[in-house]
């Protein structure tokens, strides 16, 4: 295994590079643009995530001896191209929407400018990060809205690839989740962690009571006890008897969760455990969470649906060449058209702060930026180096919170509908 990210490159990217080196076009200055032609079915907005991971990957994008050796071993890469790759390091510019920003169909989420030889190699790397992280964050933001302030825990590591699990935990936290069960996400990104025991711990012991006593002895009465291994009513009674009325929480992972939450709350209150929280998990998504909004639930644990994008595992973004030596170029294929020229965007707002329009325009085109409007893209990389002062994960999380408050309330609905704000193309 190599240590860099350069082998996150597709064969066809190297084929294009080789042909461009051969005909002398490899060093033409180009701009590529990342955008989504549409949102996943039923979605009204997308959330930008993974920008920080993308920038980090760009910094490690080089072909060392290991990478060159691996490519040479395939026998498919000409020596001319291998010699070029040995000195390759991205030295171009990247601009784009910051993490925690919303995007809509046609939004210029990322623009990459440099030589064709530099930029063409980045398509797979950039899209693999953004398509994954934006899909997860977009789904997680809908769940955050549905939870209406109740605590959300990301618990999906066992339902996806081991590296995707770490990225998913980060994206979910950016989108408003409170914690993850993934310890590597805490180590890499500082995402808060939490967790309880599983049914295996209860089954390990000779009785549910013994299991609860062992957990409380180790973790204190503030722990969360899983009460549905056998009978939920008996489990709650045993949990309170063992931990006392100061028990932190009970978790229910099966059954009719709405009914179970009501019964659990009533039983806990009758036992004097009025401050003990009720945590629900088990195949939850944004629709199930919204359906539980009226129930006495304190927190939700979400697994499969969040790490798989809740039915939309990719954001559907593409990476297209839009400018060559200052000349706009565009794809004209039916249903896959692109708009030529390097672009920027202005988000228009009412004086109240409500967003009303996304204006996408050619760079340099005269576009008014009103008092309450803002230019969305920012510089991310200049001459191959990350721009100083880019938002931290905590700042991106807060940026998204403000963005979600700014879109019209209809845009937060989980039902199918038009994008939260319309996109207008100028120039």
Image: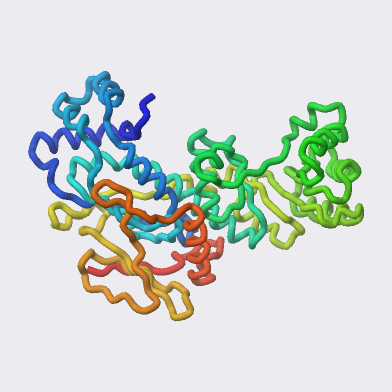
In the image, taking residue 262 as reference, residue 379 lies left or right, namely: left
Q: Which quadrant is home to the C terminus?
A: bottom left
Residue 207 vs 349, above or below: the answer is: above
Color style of the picture: rainbow
In the image, taking residue 77 as reference, residue 294 lies left or right, namely: right
Q: Which quadrant is home to the N terminus?
A: top left
In the image, taking residue 19 as reference, residue 97 lies left or right, namely: right
In percent of the image, x 51 and y 61: which residue is there?
A: 398
Residue 53, given in percent of the width and then of the height, sits at 41, 44
Image quadrant where residue 412 sits:
bottom right
Image quadrant where residue 345 sits:
bottom left
In this view of the protein, can residue 35 be seen by the observer? no
Residue 223 vs 293, above or below: the answer is: above
Residue 187, given in percent of the width and then of the height, sits at 54, 39
Instruction: Pick the residue in front: 381 or 119.
Output: 381
Residue 403, given in percent of the width and then of the height, sits at 48, 65
Image quadrant where residue 361 sits:
bottom left
């Amino acid at each position: 295994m190599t240590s860099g990210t350069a082998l996150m490159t597709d064969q066809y990217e190297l084929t294009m590079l080789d042909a461009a080196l051969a005909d002398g076009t490899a060093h033409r200055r180009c701009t590529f643009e990342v955008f989504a032609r549409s949102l996943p079915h039923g979605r009204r907005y997308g959330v930008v995530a993974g920008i920080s991971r993308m920038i980090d990957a760009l910094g490690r994008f080089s072909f060392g001896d290991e990478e060159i050796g691996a490519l040479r071993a395939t026998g498919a890469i000409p020596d001319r191209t291998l010699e070029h790759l040995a000195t390759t390091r991205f030295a171009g510019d990247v601009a784009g929407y910051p993490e925690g920003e919303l995007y809509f169909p046609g939004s210029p989420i990322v623009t990459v400018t440099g030589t064709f030889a530099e930029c063409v190699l980045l398509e797979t790397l950039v899209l693999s990060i953004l398509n994954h992280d934006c899909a997860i964050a977009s789904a997680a933001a809908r769940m955050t809205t549905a939870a209406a302030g109740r605590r959300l825990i990301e618990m999906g590591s066992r339902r996806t690839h081991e590296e995707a699990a770490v990225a998913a935990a980060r994206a979910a936290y950016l989108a408003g989740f409170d914690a993850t069960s993934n310890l590597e996400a805490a180590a890499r990104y500082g995402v808060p962690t939490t967790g309880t025991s599983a049914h295996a711990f209860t089954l390990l012991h000779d009785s549910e009571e013994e299991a609860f006593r062992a957990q409380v002895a180790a973790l204190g009465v503030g722990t969360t006890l899983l009460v549905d291994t056998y009978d939920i009513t008996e489990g709650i009674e045993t949990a309170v008897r063992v931990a006392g009325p100061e028990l932190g929480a009970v978790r229910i992972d099966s059954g009719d969760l709405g009914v179970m939450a009501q019964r659990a709350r009533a039983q806990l209150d009758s036992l004097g455990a009025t401050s003990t929280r009720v945590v629900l998990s088990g195949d939850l998504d944004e629709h199930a969470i919204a359906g539980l909004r009226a129930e006495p639930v304190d927190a939700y644990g979400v697994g499969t649906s969040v790490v798989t994008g809740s039915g939309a595992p990719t954001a559907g973004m593409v990476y297209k060449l839009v400018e060559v030596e200052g000349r706009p170029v565009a794809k004209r294929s039916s249903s896959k058209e692109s708009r030529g020229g390097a672009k920027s965007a202005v988000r228009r707002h009412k004086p109240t702060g409500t967003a009303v329009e996304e204006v996408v325009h050619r760079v340099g085109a005269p576009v008014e930026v009103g008092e309450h409007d803002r230019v969305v893209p920012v510089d991310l990389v200049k001459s191959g180096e990350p721009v100083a002062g880019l938002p931290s994960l905590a700042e991106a999380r807060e940026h998204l919170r403000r963005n979600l408050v700014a879109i019209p309330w209809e845009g937060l609905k989980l039902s199918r509908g038009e994008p939260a704000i319309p996109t207008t193309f100028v120039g």
